[in-house]
Image (cartoon, rainbow, N blue to C red):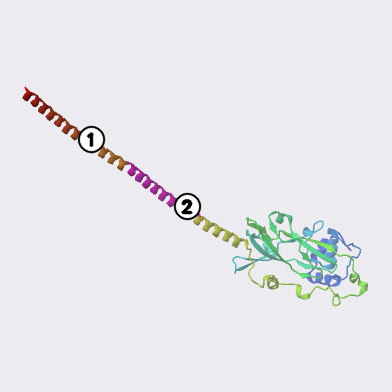
Amino acid sequence: MYTKDIDIEIEAQTESQVIENFRRSCLYDPFPFIPPALLNHTDIKKYIYSAGIIFPYNSKNLTGATYKIPLLGDIYYWETSLEKKRIKFDEQSIKNEETIKLKKNSITYIHISTTFRVPYYLVYRFNLTVSLAQKGLLLGTGPIVDPGFEGRIMIPIHNLTSNDYDLKAGSSLIRVEFTKLSPNKSFDIKEGITLETYKYKFPSSGTHWNEDKYFQDINGKNPIVSSIPGAIKNAEDIALIAKEKANNAEDSLKTIKRIAWISGLITVIGIASGIIYPTWTLINDTNIASTKLIENNERMLLKIENLEKELAKLKDDKK
């Protein structure tokens, strides 16, 4: 059944053929001998070929235990809080070497072009490639794609770093792993269970969602932007206000210092004045007192001189 050219056969399948394979195998496992486990590359290829679990298929994307999903499809982001942008990446975008910029502190939604079809005995889990995760980009912890899902998934990529990253069209975006569930008699074709009677059938309303359904479910079609830029802006505004207050406080401090300096100068002058004035008064008073003392001395000398004259006259009269 499987030749060395199996990859060529799978890649040549049309989507209608893939859908037919899935309808035939979605409930009944075509490989019951494969035990429940994380599937290896050989078993992944078997299910892709017979159960149409991935479309389109490219053999270059198959690894030892995962399948790489390329960055192709519709890309959405909000340039502002109101304006939603859309970019489409297809095969021509790869040839043109187009890129998408994941801006710092942003959220970008990628509606991948690859279609998943999940049989009821498998479950898919996906995560970012290691190279993108190492850049600091976030997807979440291993989202699961439930059994019965059909359609293109919408992937939110969070860039919470301070760097802008350019991603090339067609580059590896996520890796998908495929796990087979534990045995269930419902998956035995002998039981005759149909999708119409299967209790855990995936709701048809949840398959093949377009962009409108996804964004309606995510946030009622309201803008979806990261809160980090707003928080940074608020922090910057607060820092600016604090800086202005600090500058005002510094100016006030300088004014207070000037007032204090002037007050100190006035005080010094006042003190100096208080010392000089009394000193001058004391000197002036001393000068006045000295002058009076001299005048008194002169008067006393004059009196003594007069007394001496009178005494001499008395002596002459006795003779």
Quadrant location of the C terminus in the rendered image: top left
Residue farthest to the front, as pictured:
318
Quadrant location of the N terminus in the rendered image: bottom right
Judged from the image, the secondary structure of the residue bearing numbered disc 1 is helix
> What residue do we see at 69% from left, 58% from top?
137
- In the rendered structure, which segment of residues is drawn in magenta? 246-275
Residue type at numbered disc 1? Ser
Residue farthest to the top, as pictured:
319
- Binning the other alpha carbons within 10 Å of mark 1 as few (below 14), some (14 to 19) or many (20 upward) gives few
Which image quadrant for residue 303? top left
Residue 250's disc number? 2
> What residue do we see at 43% from left, 51% from top?
256
Residue type at numbered disc 2? Glu
Q: Nearer the viewer, residue 308 or 105?
A: 308
Q: Position of residue 177 (x, y in %)?
A: 80, 61
Judged from the image, the secondary structure of the residue bearing numbered disc 2 is helix
Residue 170 lies in the magenta stretch: no
